[in-house]
Amino acid sequence: MINTELKIESWNPTFIGYVDNPEHFKIEKKLVEHCLNLKKKIKSGGDNWISKSTYNTDNTYNIIKDKKFKSLNDWIIKNVKEYYLKLKYKDSFLCKEAWFNVYKKNDYQEFHNHPSFTLSAVYFLKSSEKDARIFFNLDPFSDANKPKIDPDFFMTSSMIHYDPTPGRLLIFRSNLLHCVERQESNDLRISLAYNFKKEI
């Protein structure tokens, strides 16, 4: 059968999962207080980050091992499993590390990825509509001859963002470039980051 009408196929697109925690507002205050107490005692991590004023516990405190996060960690791990099962990935994955980030006014996180891992997740623990958004770069390759595109057309848009909705979990491939824009609000924005490796 010949095809006389132009068709466009999309192969291997980027998949970002998101789900909202129905129990979020029961746990938010307690976990925010716990993070802020830890912040007083734990050295900030991210020594190789450009955004050095953003407090984080990357490589200084693993919240996967913290019993106060257990209920939330279990919920996140369950949803990451649902994500990779829905995408029919053949591997199973284990959460190897997790940390929290505290953004005050003017803090940000530069574009980066997590190349040692396969799946990553971000959970918005404390945030509001006016807080900094997370951006994903879907087409990081340099292309001087790239056509001008409609940023709202999902098939060709190279940059997308998610608002920091409290209690929302985002799940994505770890090699996907992402950043957090500068925090303009005076409020604190607290997020949790998780990395998963293939189970061997």
Image (cartoon, rainbow, N blue to C red):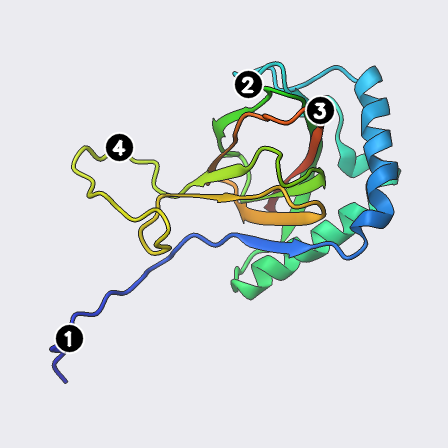
Quarter of the image for residue 28 reads: top right
Q: For residue 49, which numbered disc appears in the image? A: 2
Q: Amino acid at mark 4?
A: Ser
Q: For residue 37, which numbered disc appears in the image? A: none
Q: State how far apart marks 3 and 4 are (Cα).
A: 32 Å
Nearest the viewer among 85 and 56 is: 56
Q: Amino acid at mark 2?
A: Trp
Image location (x, y in percent) of residue 137: 41, 39
Quarter of the image for residue 164 reads: top right
**Closer to the camera: disc 2 or disc 1?**
1
Q: Which residue is mark 3?
A: 57
Q: Residue at x 64, y 61 (%)?
A: 82
Crowd around label 2: few <14 · some 14–19 · many ≥20 (10 Å): few
Image location (x, y in percent) of residue 84: 57, 58
Crowd around label 4: few <14 · some 14–19 · many ≥20 (10 Å): few
Q: Amino acid at mark 3?
A: Thr
**Closer to the camera: disc 4 or disc 1?**
1
- Cβ atoms under marks 1 and 3 closer than 8 Å: no
Q: Is residue 61 above or below residue 4?
A: above
Q: State how far apart marks 4 and 2 are (Cα).
A: 23 Å
Q: Which residue is mark 1?
A: 5
* Labels 3 and 4: the sequence-earlier one: 3
Q: Is residue 182 above or below residue 64?
A: above
Compared across the picture, whether 45 is left or right of 90 comes to: right
Look at the numbered disc 3 and give the secondary structure of its residue. loop
* Labels 4 and 1: the sequence-earlier one: 1
